[in-house]
Structure formats: C-alpha cells, structure tokens
Amino acid sequence: MPNAHNRHDKMKATDHTEDSREQILYLLKTRGAQTARFVADNLRISVVGARQHLNLMVEDGLLTRFNRAEKVGRPTGYWELTEKAQQRFPDRHGDLTVKLIDNVREIFGEQGLNALINQREKESLAEYGSALANCKSLGARVKKLAEIRSQEGYMAEAVQERRGVWLLLENHCPICAAARQCQSFCRSELAIFQQCLPQARVERCEYLLEGARRCAYRIALHA
C-alpha cells in the first residue's frame, strides 16, 4: 500500500520538523540570537538544513533575522525570537495574576500587597533553605538553586564565571506579567537569593524589565 507508506513518511517528516522547531526555539530562548552555523552544530544537521528551518520560522512569525558586523569579513546573519515566539513559553496565569494584584491593591492598598509578597518571600525562603541545607560549597548551592528555579519554570542555569564567582541565569520569567505590574516581586526574589547565599554577594546584572533578554545574578564569595 504505497499511499499508506507515503502518509506515514509525511507524518514522520512533520514530527521531525516540529521537533527541530521546538529545539530551535529553546536554543534561541536560552542562548539569545544565534547564527545558522550555531543552530546546525547544536541540532547536528547541515547549515543548509538549519537555514531552511530558520527561514520557515521567519515566515511563520516566530523569528526575525538581522545582520551583525563581525571583526573580519562580511556581516553575519543572526536569528532571534519574536514576541509571538516568546508567548510560547508560559507565563503563569498572567492575566489572572495581574487582575488579582489590581484587586489586592484596591481592597487592601499597597501595604496589603507588600504583606502578601512578604509572606510569599518567607515561604520561598523556607523551601529554598531546606533544599540547600546539605550543599557545602557555593557552587553546589548555586547549582541547586538553579535546579529549583528551573522546576518553577525559570529555565535557570548555574555558570561559573571564574573562581569564587558564579552566574545564576534565568532564561524565562513565568511571572513576568505580575512582575511588570508590581516590581516588588523582583525585589523579593533578589532578597531571597541574598538570604539563601549568605557567604556571597548577590547582585542582579541583567534585568528583563530593563530590556535584557533574561534576568541574571552574579554571585561572588565575600573577600
């Protein structure tokens, strides 16, 4: 039955294409704008194949392409996510959360909203502190923290920048709508990290709400 085989082959090709798309979306979400060569190397496909996927995703409104001048030679093409693509990474009940924040402000005022955020901070600090209790080194604590944050939807990574200095990278913010409405959530999260890592100085070095593509925290052992 050649027709059945053809349908099966088309279904396999479609599934493979969708898998590649999802990998590309994740790659550009976590690594920022990249070249076709970078995508090809990570997906283990040809550069021609990578460009085909990338150009189709541009047509679908998921990516945009731009040229970046390099030190030598002609400008190089880069692809990055569009707002449409960003929406494929979930914000935890964003519209509902914003409405609830507005309602709390209206009924209880700014003081009531701050009390709510402080209670969330206490609960998170207790949970994180318990999870980090057996981590002896700064690196182990940052890695564990990244693992917890990833489970919460932040697509987090722990990267050692140099000896005694780590980066906690959060490639997605699942409460972005709430944070835009009330930046006390961001203040609270920084305070949580600082209390969870008392042996280090913790500072936010990239901030999504100030135009960065992610939030990042530099964590350095006290001298």
Image (cartoon, rainbow, N blue to C red):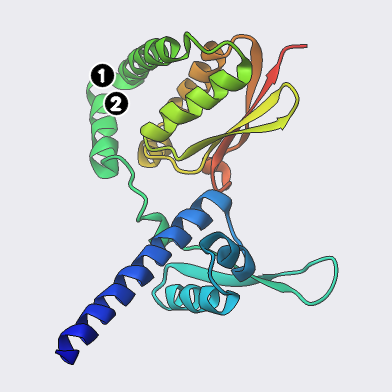
Q: What is the distance, in whole Å, between disc 2 and disc 1 at their CAs? A: 5 Å
Picture quarter containing residue 40?
bottom right
What residue sits right under mark 2 in the picture? Answer: 105
Residue furthest front as drawn: 1
Does residue 43 sit above or below 132 in this rendering? below
Which of these two is toward me, 38 or 214?
A: 38
The residue at 38%/10% (across/down) is: 126
What residue sits right under mark 1 in the picture? Answer: 108
Residue 178 is situated, as x and y percent measured from the top left of the image, at: 36, 36
What amino acid is at disc 2?
Answer: Arg
Picture quarter containing residue 152?
top left
The residue at 57%/74% (across/down) is: 46
Which of these two is toward me, 2 or 159?
A: 2
> Tags 2 and 1 in contact by the CB under 8 Å rule?
yes
Which of these two is toward me, 109 or 57?
A: 57
Does residue 210 sit above or below 110 in this rendering? below
The residue at 35%/56% (across/down) is: 88
- Label 2, secondary structure: give it: helix
Residue 201 is situated, as x and y percent measured from the top left of the image, at: 66, 17
What amino acid is at disc 1?
Answer: Phe
Quadrant location of the N terminus?
A: bottom left
Picture quarter containing residue 149?
top left
Quadrant location of the C terminus?
A: top right
Question: 170 left or right of 166?
Answer: left
Specify few, some or many for label 2: CA neighbours under 10 Å numbering under 14, 14-19, or 20 or more. some
The residue at 33%/47% (across/down) is: 90
Specify few, some or many for label 1: CA neighbours under 10 Å numbering under 14, 14-19, or 20 or more. few
Residue 181 is situated, as x and y percent measured from the top left of the image, at: 38, 37
- Label 1, secondary structure: give it: helix
